[in-house]
Amino acid sequence: MMDKIRKFRDNPPLITHEARDAARAQLLHAMREPALTGRRQRRPRLAWRLVLAASLAVATVVGFTVTRDADQPVIVPIANVGELGERAARAAETDPDAIVLSPGKWLYTKETIAPLLKEPRPEVDMEQRITLEQWHSADGRQTALDDGTGRLVHHETGPGITATDLAEAPVTPEEMLTRMRAALSGKPVPPAADESDGTMEERLFQTIHQLMSGQPLVPEVRAALFRALPMIKGVSVKQDAVDATGRHGNAFVYTGAWQRSEIIVSPEDYRFLGTYGETIADRTFFSERVGTVKAGTPTVWTAHLESQVVDRPGDRP
């Protein structure tokens, strides 16, 4: 499966100059566009995906079919979400390959995602993939993304709390949740009339998802976040989840009023693999136009591929 990704990366399909220019303009606009408020607010937790979708025309597009390979690890049953959290936490604490950034260094990350089927609808195309590369500062406050020309666009991180904030002692699951609640309390929650999943529980779950996928977390913080997940009311375990490259694993799951979200970890070493989300009820969304997505619509599918320490944004391992 990785051979397929490398093949398309090294021999990308032809893309017209007009498509490239349009995608670059859309990407830059999406990065700079301020969040909307009120009933016409886009769901904050999807903002990063809209940015990624804008870069579709300047990324490698890969046709994809997920199958279970013969060498896939056997999924060991997990009794409950508490057990999954503890196993993942212990693995994070003892990980010999854990990445710790020195001041001034940057964390390079690569992931593959299912792109949006059609902007601005929140449905993703399950049969296509794009590869995304990002750079994250050591303090967790800045992220850089290639705009398709080799020029990096810098922007502030999305969760509202950083790796540096979480690494201050004491580093405990309870303290992680307390700090995230404090950071989230200053952010607007979509009104209940919109039937949005604006509960604090889901916002905590989504924040941990963003931290896992894009922040340079030290092992102690990563372990504390894994132990914090079972402490969020409504989080359960899924025995066999699949990331966007077809890797199978166990997942932390939050089921809200209209969407189910998964944070997938490896069944072997419990490392973060990726995410999946789909609607569980019909949902009206507000953007340039009003639209509706049906229950069972996939809204996010990702797979984390690589993390490496580099000297500056734009550097690749």
Image (spheres, helix red, strand yellow):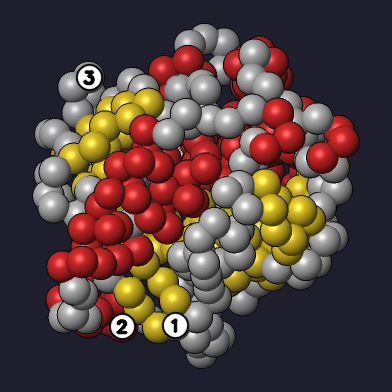
> In the image, residue 6 lies at what x, y percent?
24, 76
Q: Residue at x 44, y 82 (%)?
A: 64
The residue indicated by pointer 1 is 64
Amino acid type shown at disc 1: Phe
Q: Amino acid at mark 2?
A: Lys
Question: Do we see residue 209 in this rendering?
Answer: no
- Nearer to the camera, 96 or 274: 274
Q: CA distance from mark 3 to mark 2?
A: 36 Å
Q: Which mark is first along the chain, 2 or 3?
A: 2
* Nearer to us in this view, 80 or 316: 316
Circle 3 packing at 10 Å, graded few (<14), some (14-19), many (20+), is few
Q: Which residue is mark 2?
A: 4
Compared across the picture, whether 2 is left or right of 72 comes to left
Q: Is residue 145 above or below residue 216?
A: below
Q: So how many labels did they put on this image?
A: 3
Residue at point 60% right, 58% down?
122
Front disc: 3 or 2: 2
Q: Which class describes the residues within 10 Å of circle 2: few (<14), some (14-19), or many (20+)?
A: few
| Quarter in which the N terminus is drawn | bottom left
Which kind of residue does numbered mark 3 sit on? Pro
Q: Residue furthest top?
A: 169
If you read the primary sequence from the N terminus, does the residue marked by circle 1 or circle 2 appear first? 2
Residue 307, horizontal then vertical, whole percent:
31, 48
Residue hosting label 3: 103
Q: CA distance from mark 1 to mark 2?
A: 9 Å
Q: Given contact means CB atoms under 8 Å apart, are the residues at marks 1 and 2 in contact?
A: yes
